[in-house]
Image: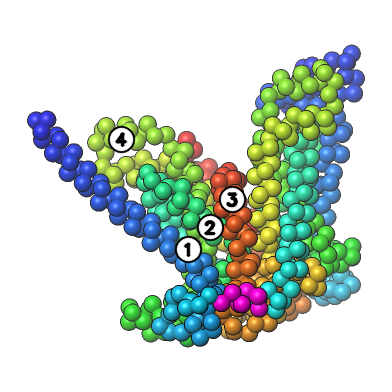
Amino acid sequence: MSKKNANDRQIRDSGSITLTAVKYVVLTIGALVMMFPFIWMLLTSLKTLPEAISIPPQWMPSDPQWVNYEYSWNLVPFGMFFRNTIWVGILSVVVTLVLSILGAYAFSIYSFPGHNLCFYLFMLTMMVPNEILIIQNYVTCSKLGMLDSFSGIVLPTVANGFYIFMLQEYFLQTPPSLFKAAKVDGCSNLKYLIKVVIPMNVNAIVTVAILTFITAWNSFMWPLIVTMSDEHTLLSVGLLRFRQASSSNLHNQMAAACIVLIPMVVFYIIFHKKIMEGVASGGTKG
Amino acid sequence: MEKVKTAKKEKQPKYRLVEMSDGTLRVRSAWAYAYILPAMALLLLFTLYPLVMVLRTAFYQKYIYITNTGTGFGMSSFIWVLKDPTFWMACKNTLILLLIALPITLVIALGAALLINSIKKLQGFFQTVYFLPYVTSTIAIGMAFLWLFHSDYGYINYFLEFLGIPPQKWLTDPDLMIVTLSIFSIWNGLAFKILLFLAGLQKINKQVYQAARIDGASPAKTLFRITLPLLSPTIWMVILVSVIYVARTFNEVYAMFVSYAGGAAGTGNAAITIMYYIYWMFYDQGKVNYAAAAAILFLIVIILITVVQRVVSKKFVHYV
């Protein structure tokens, strides 16, 4: 009886080992499909043009052409695009954080007439696709003299109802007893925000910062419309300009694409836990 | 709605503490407006005001963009847009992305998430690899896809030759362009959905599986009777988010079919989506009132979808 059971288990175990192996094989193939464009880009960026366009494909560059990167870096002012993108990223993060923290704090700590109305207005920004607002925002920016400027890129995108909503949920979890104690000690509301609420919710705030930074780094449609000069062009738009300028030099195009991608990949490798946590808890994109 | 419980006047004459119905403590003070003001000002200026103005622009018979003035109110812009074959092409393409590409993405993502969730080693590794496309620029990745789909030098045609399929003009054949766009958006959309499905799977109580095993449930039965029903709120949430997201497809079109200088979405505008149509009308064609009319039509559809989703989720999705 017990022997039969052991036999059964062995059969089941060997079955599950095959199953596990199949799972890993399928997942590895999937991972290769997901990674393929990245790997191919990286390899192609180091090839010569004949190597890059040869059919049948030559997978590995015979002699890494680092000069492709030098050429691409100089064909359009990528250095300037980088500075611009980093600057826009930082600006977006700082302004978004200030606005969202203050807004979320007001909703979580205050009771005031119009509380719900204001809240629904902020929910509206989550409902209305930004893209349909560009038509009017372009006019507004031109009237305010913000066309082709960093404030023009950043300001229309930072009042984000989603982050206010998300931070508010976190802020509400601060124990009321803490608030009572602070009030008894004569702590002002602003001081309570800075000394208690922000330190207690650093995690959520960092998540908002990282998500905002990624969104700003990859933002495309609005910067494309609102900027013109090199001094305010972001990487994603600059890359398209490069594609135009380089005609059909595949190897140089891939070098340029890698220039844009690699910093984000490094950023992702460093912060991947935080990023995935943030996106999973938020559940939005764009 | 709210009860005033503690109003200690002797210590804090400036604030009135209010206990809300949900047990949280709040301060009744006009200072709240100061905290909201910065965000609210930008919200009014860059979301609410443009929304109203786009509505107004859409109803102008004639509109001059430079002065932002128009004359005559009427439905002519809407009628023009509704008669424009390009608009219907954009609707058709967006529907293909929604009804064919999105379900494929969801199924693949669900499968991948189930697989990743069922293994013990390297779970984090696979999760990290599959999520990478989410953080990378669609424009940059699009440049790689552009060449992979190239009719002469592209690896995709090269691989297809092994399967006996003749080389296709993925980027220029009007019938194939939507297929190409769908493949790119499936690849691009997987990361986000896999992550959310995994997060949902990890929330399911492990004891349920133990109980199922003790009862001798087969893996298939476990999947269909336990995992999927318990995951249904997550699946529904992912559908809600991605329908709106896919309806807004723009970057993928621009990356694959449009040059830096702008213009039509590929040969004969065959890869156009609604979002690209709005952009194209506005920025390329300069027909702002038509762009506004299309934007309003799009908004109405989005609102309708949201309402339908609300009703459906109230009726059919059981939250655990």
Chain letter for mark 4 = B
For marks 4 and 3, give the one nearer the viewer: 3
Give the distance between the C-alpha atoms of the residues marked 4 and 2, in whole angstroms.
34 Å
| Badge 2 amino acid | Leu
- Can you tell which of label 3 and label 1 is closer to the viewer? 3
Is disc 2 placed on a helix, strand or loop?
helix
C-alpha gap between disc 2 and disc 1? 8 Å
C-alpha separation, residue under disc 3 versus residue under disc 2: 12 Å
Q: Is residue A214 visible?
A: yes
| SS for callout 3 | helix
Residue A35's disc is: 1
Report the chain holding disc 2: B
Q: Are marks 1 and 4 in contact (CB under 8 Å)?
A: no
For the point 70% across and 58% down, the residue is A216
Q: Specify the label residue A270 is tagged with.
A: 3
Between B90 and B156, the one lying in front of the other is B156
What residue lies at 29% left-to-right and 44% top-to-bottom?
Answer: B219
Magenta span includes B319: no
Q: Amino acid at mark 4?
A: Ala
Q: Is B22 displayed left or right of B237 in the figure?
A: right
Q: Residue at x 32, y 31 (%)?
A: B211
Instruction: State yes or no: discs 3 and 2 in contact (Cβ < 8 Å).
Output: no
Q: Which residue is label 2 attached to?
A: B132
Q: Which residue is mark 4?
A: B212
- For the residues marked 1 and 4, what is the alpha-carbon distance in whole angstroms? 36 Å
